[in-house]
Image (cartoon, rainbow, N blue to C red):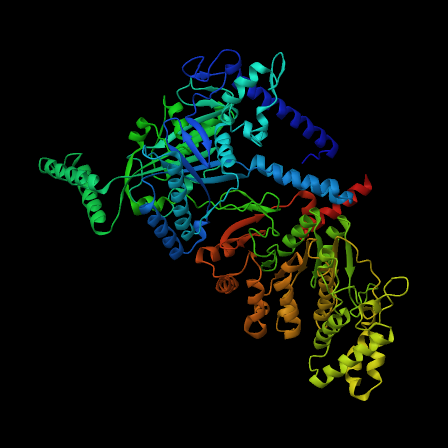
């Protein structure tokens, strides 16, 4: 991938902004020319081509109070809906979703439209966010990785990633009542829809400025090209200044000051610059080719599966969908069905069973009897449904290929589609979220269906997880959308915690490091504790300017367990500027009790009390008491802190505490003495890796506790700054080889990290030990306190274990078993998706653990030296 210089990027960005401004002006000119230079909105150059603006083509009179008012005086309400991942639900859950959706259709307005827009992923907000981090970043390597990350997202957005938006369209076409009553009725219908759709697991998006939301939807529907480069933004600001060929025209000119404000509206600014309806097979709007297909009335499969419309929804880039439902009055339709059935029976008597139409008549009679029975006995309603497919492309050749591909796909589903030849303009207008279907297309595409069949279409199944200011994780395997999560978004996620589970070789370490690097790019403080294979974290850490610390008996680096690093227990001191004065010494002593419980599992209650006295005495000898001011010398610097050797001396003075002294002698004069000294490493870094993988099995829980104690102190210093603690192989602290005190401390991190503005990431590959201590109490509690879970590939028996704890469906469980390396199941609240982790080339080279990749890196380095 070609690397871009950031300065060139900035210059290009400024040019694009200037070009976009000019483009906006030109758009306004050409639409307003008809007003300034003697033409009217209704003036057309020909019957099918509109070069001076297309205001007269679009049947919208106004947008106000969150409602679209059409030119035929209908009032339209749009509800944006966030879908669910239907195919990963269990069979019972799927049936429940269809049941509740069917219940809604029974009480919904008679006419409904489901409008589904497919478009290239909008990454502007993500890239702007990364640009801010780039400019604030000081480390050059990190800046380079930010650029590569932005390039990766841009590449995915252009070549692979699409996004979909789902809208439910309601109308009030009553002629009686005033505007206020009509809008109030629409709002009431929208509230009812929200309640029933919530039962289906769907969420209705609440927009603060509903008028702007509606303008944005219409704007992007009409201008598929311009909306990618010129966001609608503030429509009021687009009204001035206005330019023409001979210079600027401002509102201060008396002639135009009276003319323009009353004639130029926001709607004038969002219509396409020009449109071309001259071809029978497509139209051109805003430079984009549009073609339309509809499912013919006889072209539906008689027997359908649940969510049968979803494959069309997920067809890919350039394919959007409109699904219409029109409920018929029962008292009118039942007599028609009865009459038609009776006529068919009469005809049947005169038709021999060898005639070609015998089977058709027989089928029609059966259908009529079935519908009468279902409507009379089971309360089913009768609907007409219509499906209109919109296909767009940048040029005629690409459009033709996409149309043929869609026809082939529909044929494979036993669905017959027809091209809307000579009806492209009508189809274009019908595809807008205005609940209006051209009568001729409506007649050809009409299919009768009962409530259950209509509900089974359920198109809201293409779930996406894309927080534009979040962190790129990868690609949604179900619909090819980008998976970008903002773990710290409290409006969407109750906490920022994450658990990562997977078998050896599934890509757990790769994912952990990738997540850590991308968090660091966004200026989030990273603490990564590696109890196994810590060397795998070194390259990435040093490449990004981090601090790699190795704690082992043979290492010279040390973090003192007895060092007091906090100056106050009041986390809110930076907010309130007030300090309560709670003792930090008491907090440190409590943690040292946990340390001793790991070091000396058989400690008695009496010995614990004696240890408490010895600890207080040890700190007193260094002038440190429960008064926090005693932590500092006269210069205001921290006093010298005691180490384990000083505690050993105090414990050795009394016979009753000599066992305790013996327990720590290994850290004083024994093989682990390098771990018992003063802290001798710089801990002021935004990316810290604590490698404790060479401590040995007996010392590993102690080393993990030392690392976690340090990081927890740093986390508690602020509730404002974002930070993340990553604990790999957390089963070491909550598994069978640990104890309840250490497990409780780990669980405390999971429970209250959110309260300190932190994210806690827990990873494990040994599920047996993860759920071993106290019948899995701590493992289950950690999972329950992680709003987000990533389950990478597991063997089937382990997948069944995790199914029980996460309440996964059989399909979700099989998704885990079928996953390959770097693939897995992402559980974000109630929604679950299959995700494929994606990394940039530099990221991949730094964190890969594959033997052949490492061999390639060594050979490349050797070749560079030779050159």
The quarter of the rendered structure image containing the N terminus is top right
Give residue 56's position: percent from left, percent from top: 43, 20
Residue 105's image quarter?
Answer: top left
Note whether 206 is above or below 556 in the view shown: above
Figure disc tally: 0
Residue 47's image quarter?
Answer: top left
Give residue 592's position: percent from left, percent from top: 74, 73
The quarter of the rendered structure image containing the C terminus is top right
Note whether 422 is above or below 703 in the view shown: above
Residue 122's image quarter?
Answer: top right
Q: Nearer the viewer, residue 462 or 103?
A: 103
Note whether 55 is above or below 464 in the view shown: above
Q: Is residue 739 visible?
A: no
The answer to whether 816 appears left or right of 143 in the picture is left
Q: Residue furthest bottom?
A: 655
Q: Residue furthest left?
A: 350
Give residue 55's position: percent from left, percent from top: 46, 22
Q: Residue at point 70% right, 44% down?
A: 842
Q: Is residue 354 visible?
A: yes
Q: Nearer the viewer, residue 457 or 113?
A: 113
Q: Residue at point 39% right, 55% down?
A: 91
Give residue 355's position: percent from left, percent from top: 15, 34
The answer to whether 562 appears left or right of 17 in the picture is right
């Amino acid at each position: 991938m070609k690397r871009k210089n950031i300065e060139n990027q900035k210059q290009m960005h400024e040019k694009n902004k200037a070009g976009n401004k000019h483009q906006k002006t030109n758009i306004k000119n050409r639409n307003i020319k008809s007003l300034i230079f003697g033409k009217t909105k209704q003036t057309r150059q020909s019957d099918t081509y509109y070069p001076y603006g297309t205001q007269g083509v679009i049947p919208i009179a106004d947008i106000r109070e969150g409602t679209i008012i059409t030119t035929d005086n209908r009032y339209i309400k749009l509800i944006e809906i966030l879908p669910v991942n239907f195919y990963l639900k269990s069979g019972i859950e799927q049936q429940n979703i269809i049941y509740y959706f069917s219940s809604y259709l029974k009480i919904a307005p008679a006419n409904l439209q489901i409008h589904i827009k497919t478009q290239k992923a909008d990454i502007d907000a993500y890239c702007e966010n990364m640009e801010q981090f780039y400019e604030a970043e000081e480390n050059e390597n990190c800046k380079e990785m930010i650029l590569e990350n932005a390039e990766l997202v841009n590449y995915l957005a252009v070549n692979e990633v699409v996004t979909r938006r789902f809208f439910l369209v309601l109308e009030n076409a009553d002629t009686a009542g005033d505007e206020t009553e009509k809008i109030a009725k629409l709002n009431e219908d929208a509230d009812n829809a929200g309640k029933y759709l919530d039962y289906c697991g769907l969420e209705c998006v609440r927009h603060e400025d509903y008028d702007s939301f509606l303008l944005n939807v219409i704007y992007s529907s009409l201008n598929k090209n311009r909306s990618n480069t010129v966001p609608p933004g503030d429509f009021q600001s687009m009204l001035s200044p206005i330019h023409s060929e001979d210079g600027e025209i401002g509102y201060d000119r008396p002639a135009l000051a009276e003319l323009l404000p009353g004639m130029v509206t926001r709607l004038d600014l969002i219509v396409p610059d020009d449109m071309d309806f001259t071809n029978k097979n497509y139209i051109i709007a805003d430079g984009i080719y549009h073609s339309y297909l509809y499912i013919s009335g006889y072209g539906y499969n008689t027997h359908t599966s649940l969510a049968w419309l979803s494959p069309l929804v997920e067809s890919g880039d350039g394919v959007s969908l409109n699904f219409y439902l029109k409920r018929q009055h029962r008292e009118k339709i039942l007599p028609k069905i009865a009459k038609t059935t009776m006529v068919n029976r009469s005809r049947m008597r005169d038709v021999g069973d060898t005639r070609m139409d015998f089977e058709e008549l027989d089928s029609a009679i059966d259908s009529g009897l079935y519908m009468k029975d279902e409507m009379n006995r089971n309360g089913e309603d009768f609907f007409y449904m219509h499906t209109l497919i919109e296909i767009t492309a940048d040029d005629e050749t690409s459009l033709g290929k996409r149309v043929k591909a869609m026809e082939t796909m529909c044929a494979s589903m036993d669905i017959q589609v027809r091209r809307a030849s000579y009806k492209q303009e009508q189809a274009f207008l019908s595809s807008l979220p205005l609940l209006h279907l051209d009568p001729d297309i409506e007649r050809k595409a009409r299919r009768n269906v009962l409530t259950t069949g209509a509900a089974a279409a359920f198109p809201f199944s293409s779930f996406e997880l894309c927080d534009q200011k979040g962190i790129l994780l990868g690609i949604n395997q179900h619909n090819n959308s980008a998976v970008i999560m903002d773990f710290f978004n409290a409006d969407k996620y109750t906490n920022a915690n994450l658990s990562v589970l997977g078998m050896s070789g599934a890509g757990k370490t790769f994912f952990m490091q990738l997540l850590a690097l991308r968090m660091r790019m966004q200026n989030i403080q990273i603490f990564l504790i590696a109890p196994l294979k810590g060397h795998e974290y070194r390259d990435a850490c040093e490449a990004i300017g981090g601090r790699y610390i190795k704690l082992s008996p043979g290492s010279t680096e040390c973090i003192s367990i007895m060092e007091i690093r906090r100056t106050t227990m009041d986390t809110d001191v930076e907010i309130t500027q007030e300090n309560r004065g709670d003792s930090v010494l008491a907090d440190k002593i409590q943690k040292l009790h946990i340390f001793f419980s790991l070091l000396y599992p058989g400690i008695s209650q009496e010995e614990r009390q004696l240890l408490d006295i010895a600890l207080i005495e040890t700190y007193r000898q260094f002038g440190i008491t429960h008064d926090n001011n005693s932590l500092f010398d006269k210069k205001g610097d921290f006093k010298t802190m005691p180490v384990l050797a000083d505690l050993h001396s105090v414990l050795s003075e009394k016979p009753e505490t000599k066992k305790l002294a013996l327990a720590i002698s290994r850290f004083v004069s024994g093989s682990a003495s390098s771990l018992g000294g003063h802290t001798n490493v710089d801990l002021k870094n935004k990316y810290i890796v604590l490698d404790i993988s060479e401590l040995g099995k007996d010392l590993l829980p102690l080393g993990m506790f030392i690392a976690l104690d340090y990081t927890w102190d740093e986390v508690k210093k602020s509730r404002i700054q974002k930070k993340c603690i990553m604990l790999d192989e957390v089963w070491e602290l909550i598994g069978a080889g640990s104890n309840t005190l250490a497990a409780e401390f780990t669980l405390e991190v999971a429970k209250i990290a959110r309260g300190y503005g932190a994210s806690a990431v827990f990873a494990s590959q040994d599920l047996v030990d993860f759920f071993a201590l106290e019948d899995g109490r701590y493992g289950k509690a950690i999972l329950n306190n992680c709003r987000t879970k990533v389950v990478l590939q597991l063997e089937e028996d382990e997948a069944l274990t995790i199914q029980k704890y996460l309440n996964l469906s059989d399909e979700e469980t099989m998704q885990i078993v079928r996953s390959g390396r770097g693939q897995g199941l992402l559980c974000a609240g109630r929604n679950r998706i299959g995700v494929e982790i994606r990394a940039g080339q530099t990221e991949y080279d730094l964190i890969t653990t594959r033997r052949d990749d490492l061999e390639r890196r060594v050979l490349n380095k050797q070749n560079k030296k030779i050159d």
